[in-house]
Image (tube, rainbow, N blue to C red):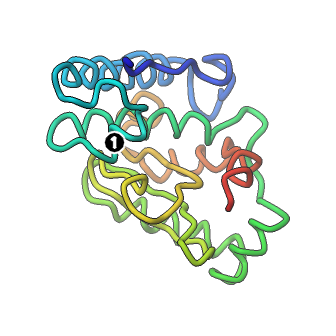
Amino acid sequence: MPIELPALPYARAALEPHISAATLDLHHGGHHRGYVDEANRLLEGSGLEGLALEDVVRRARGRLAEQAAQAWNHGFYWTCLSPRGGGEPGGRLGELLARQYGDFARFRDEFNRMALGLFGSGWVWLVQRPDGSPGIVATRGAATPLTGADTPLLACDAWEHAYYLDRQNARGDYLEAFWKVVDWEAVVRRLR
């Protein structure tokens, strides 16, 4: 089955003023579409053609693995954002973060530290470990926790195309905007 570019779960201008429609056009319609198209091209004759995208990511190697992972990472990223997002998570997730990091502010500081310390392009993830505890993972390039034992809960795209149009090279400013549109309800639904 071919990999498809998922539609954004909100209107292209819905995240403004935090993330612009122009950035979404470039990021979703350009970069994400490019990963999907290239993954589909590489999928032909790979023996993995009938698999779901998640399974392609887990089983592929080389360039197909990279392109499929980027397609999956981006599709997941869009579901982490909402025009009604922001604030702090409550309930079980809030309790898990407080237990692991002391409070939400310390969690956010650690997440930002990881994102700002990531040299080059990549992703920063809130994951749930197999023991149920939360963790923060930074991955380079197309790497994704989907291929390991952790359950991805939240993704922050730290590639420049996620913020360059809006913020030039100011990753810290992008992170401030990111926190204003995080969809905590979606994150909570992913908890095991």
Residue 70 appears in the picture as rendered: yes
* Residue at 39% across, 51% down: 123
Q: Position of residue 179 (x, y in %)?
A: 64, 50
Vertical relation: 57 (above or below) 71: below
| Nearest to the observer: residue 86 or residue 5 | 5
Crowding near pointer 1: few (<14 within 10 Å), some, many (20+)?
many
Residue corresponding to mark 1: 57
Q: Position of residue 60 (x, y in %)?
A: 24, 41
| Nearest to the observer: residue 181 or residue 77 | 77
* Residue at 38% across, 31% down: 51
Residue 163 appears in the picture as rendered: no
Of the 4 image quadrants, the one containing the C terminus is bottom right
Judged left or right of residue 96, residue 70 is left
The answer to which image quadrant residue 79 occupies is top right
The answer to which image quadrant residue 52 occupies is top left
Judged left or right of residue 51, residue 101 is right
Q: Position of residue 36 (x, y in %)?
A: 34, 22
Of the 4 image quadrants, the one containing the N terminus is top left
* Residue at 54% across, 72% down: 130
Vertical relation: 78 (above or below) 178: above
Judged left or right of residue 120, residue 28 is right
Amino acid carrying label 1: it is Val
Vertical relation: 52 (above or below) 34: below
